[in-house]
Image (tube, helix red, strand yellow):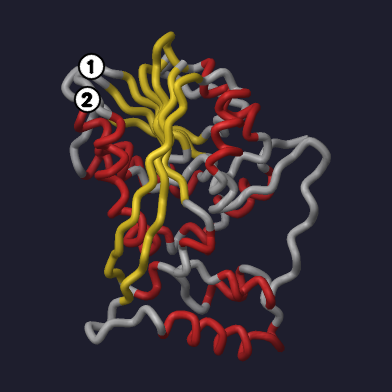
């Protein structure tokens, strides 16, 4: 059975990934927190898991320059191409990117001193297998630092109401786990996954911040059809989306969103 099959389809859909730069307005504010937690040193080799458009990878590459390197790995070819262009345009020569599913594949450039991720590790359908593979790619004493969301209840910007208008997701196949933005929201479950994967010294730090961003960084109408909202349900879904976002709007035309995320640290 192919690993992360549903996520491979999602993140290689050109319609979905074309909107990614808009989404980054929401998550860019988290990058400084992640980089600070990484405490990177010159000459370290860094693996960024689920590197997306590459901004955190590029930030890590700058932190370990001139002799260190950062390698971004993602299952999305379109986003990997975007990340590669960005690194070239920014003249960050020690950042590179590859299309890889880190649940089952080993990106070139290892072993690594550090494995990092900004909202990229919640999409593994076999999380223990995935983190075990990440563990194996680290040097002895290497460290893992990942940012993921706290619960959906603590992130009210997420339009959970859309679930009433889309077909329910299929049950995971035997041996698979549900994936999605909040798959690692439970701190105890996440710590247990890391423990099963061989990591030690697991710690968690919760963070809260508010960001002012364009409304389409969270949701836009085109996503309703992509998510499978039937044509006859589009008016009701649009009304629900309008009602949901109204509470966050500012006179400036932006929306102010409360972000609640957590950073886990662990060591090999």
**Circle nearer the N terminus (1, 2):** 1
| Residue 21 visible in the displayed image | no
The image quarter containing residue 250 is bottom left
| Residue 98 visible in the displayed image | yes
> Where in the figure is residue 220, as x and y percent of width and height?
47, 75
- Give the number of the disc on residue 132: none
Disc 1 designates what residue? 43
Q: Residues within 10 Å of mark 2 (few under 14, many from 20)?
A: many
> Where in the figure is residue 35, as x and y percent of width and height?
27, 37
Q: Residue at x 47, y 51 (%)?
A: 149
Q: Residues within 10 Å of mark 1 (few under 14, many from 20)?
A: some
Left or right, 71 with reference to 234: left
Question: Relative to 85, is 252 above or below?
Answer: below
Q: Secondary structure at mark 1?
A: loop
The image quarter containing residue 65 is top left
Question: Relative to 49, is 168 above or below?
Answer: below
For the residue pair 55 and 162, the one nearer the viewer reads as 162
The image quarter containing residue 20 is bottom left
State yes or no: discs 1 and 2 in contact (Cβ < 8 Å).
yes
Disc 2 designates what residue? 64
> Where in the figure is residue 78, as x and y percent of width and height?
47, 49
Left or right, 196 with reference to 38: right
> Where in the figure is residue 69, as x and y percent of width and height?
29, 23
């Amino acid at each position: 059975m192919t690993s992360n099959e549903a996520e491979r389809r999602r993140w290689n859909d050109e319609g979905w990934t074309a909107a990614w730069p808009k989404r980054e307005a929401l998550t860019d504010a988290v990058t400084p927190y992640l980089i600070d937690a990484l405490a990177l040193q010159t000459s370290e080799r860094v693996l960024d898991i689920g590197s997306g458009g590459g901004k955190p990878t590029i930030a890590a590459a700058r932190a370990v320059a001139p002799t260190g390197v950062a390698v971004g790995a993602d299952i999305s070819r379109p986003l990997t191409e975007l990340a590669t262009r960005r690194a070239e345009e920014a003249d960050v020569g020690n950042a590179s990117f590859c299309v890889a599913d880190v649940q089952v594949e080993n990106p070139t450039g290892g072993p690594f001193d550090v494995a990092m991720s900004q909202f990229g590790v919640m999409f593994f359908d076999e999380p223990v297998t995935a983190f075990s593979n990440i563990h194996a790619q680290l040097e002895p004493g290497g460290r893992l630092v990942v940012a993921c969301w706290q619960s959906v209840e603590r992130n009210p910007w997420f339009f959970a109401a859309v679930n009433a208008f889309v077909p329910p997701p299929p049950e995971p196949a035997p041996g698979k786990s549900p994936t999605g933005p909040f798959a690692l929201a439970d701190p105890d479950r996440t710590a247990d996954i890391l423990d099963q994967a061989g990591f030690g010294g697991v710690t968690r730090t919760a963070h809260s911040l508010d960001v002012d961003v364009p409304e389409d960084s969270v949701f836009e109408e085109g996503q309703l059809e992509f998510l499978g909202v039937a044509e006859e349900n589009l008016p009701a879904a649009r009304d629900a989306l309008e009602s949901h976002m109204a509470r966050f709007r500012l006179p400036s035309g932006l929306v102010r969103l409360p972000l609640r995320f957590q950073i886990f640290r662990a060591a090999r």
